[in-house]
Image (spheres, rainbow, N blue to C red):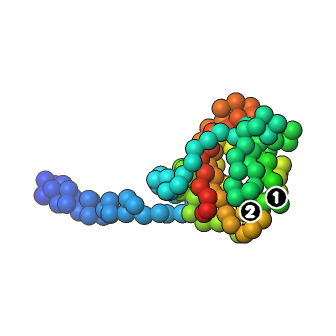
Amino acid sequence: MKALLAFSLLFVIPACGGDDDDKDDVRGNNSAQTVLDPEGTIITQISSISGGGTFMVDGTTVGFSSHHGCFYISNEAMIATVGAVNGLGNITTKPTSGWVGSGQMLPEKGYGYVIKLADGTYCRLFVMEKVSTNNFKIKYQYPF
């Protein structure tokens, strides 16, 4: 009887575990599953704005303010975090709160951010690594 029960469980347990058909399912900002980078992803580094380690997004400068230890964003743009994520592709929604201006958001490795530009468009950004005190390797996509 025990052998029959053990044999039966071999077929029941896998059926309860679900399937792998959802590998491409986007599960939201905090998914444990890594989602591929979206088309148009750019990988770069940001560093101190005085050192020229910035990039432009539709006329808005994005970089790092060593004076404040935070993101630098120009032109009245705002930034908000979506928290820890597995990559740029895991940033799937725009925050509804938590928006701050330049010099108020600390970049953190493994965290995702959304930048709202003055014209109402958005950019998503993921901090891949902290290269040094004032230097971060990032991925971003615009528009988002």
Q: Quadrant of residue 118?
A: bottom right
Q: Is residue 106 visible?
A: no
Residue 64 in view: yes
Q: Quadrant of residue 138?
A: top right
Q: Nearer the viewer, residue 21 or 132?
A: 132
The answer to whether residue 94 is left or right of residue 88 is: right
Query: What residue do we see at 65% from left, 66% from top?
Result: 94
- Quadrant into which the C terminus falls: bottom right
* Rendered location of residue 135, percent (x, y): 70, 35
Precedes in sequence: disc 2 or disc 1: 1
Q: Does residue 143 appear left or right of residue 15 in this picture?
A: right
- Asked whether the residues under the numbered discs 2 and 1 touch, taking CB atoms below 8 Å apart as contact, a structural biologist would say yes
Q: Residue farthest to the top?
A: 132
Identified by mark 2, the residue type is Leu
Q: Quadrant of the N terminus?
A: bottom left
**Residue of label 1:** 75
What is the secondary structure assignment of the residue under circle 1? loop
Residue ID for mark 2: 117
Of residue 107 and residue 49, the one placed in the foreground of this image is: 49
**Around disc 1, counting alpha carbons within 10 Å, would you say few (fewer than 14), some (14 to 19), or many (20 or more)?**
some
Q: Nearer the viewer, residue 66 or 141?
A: 141
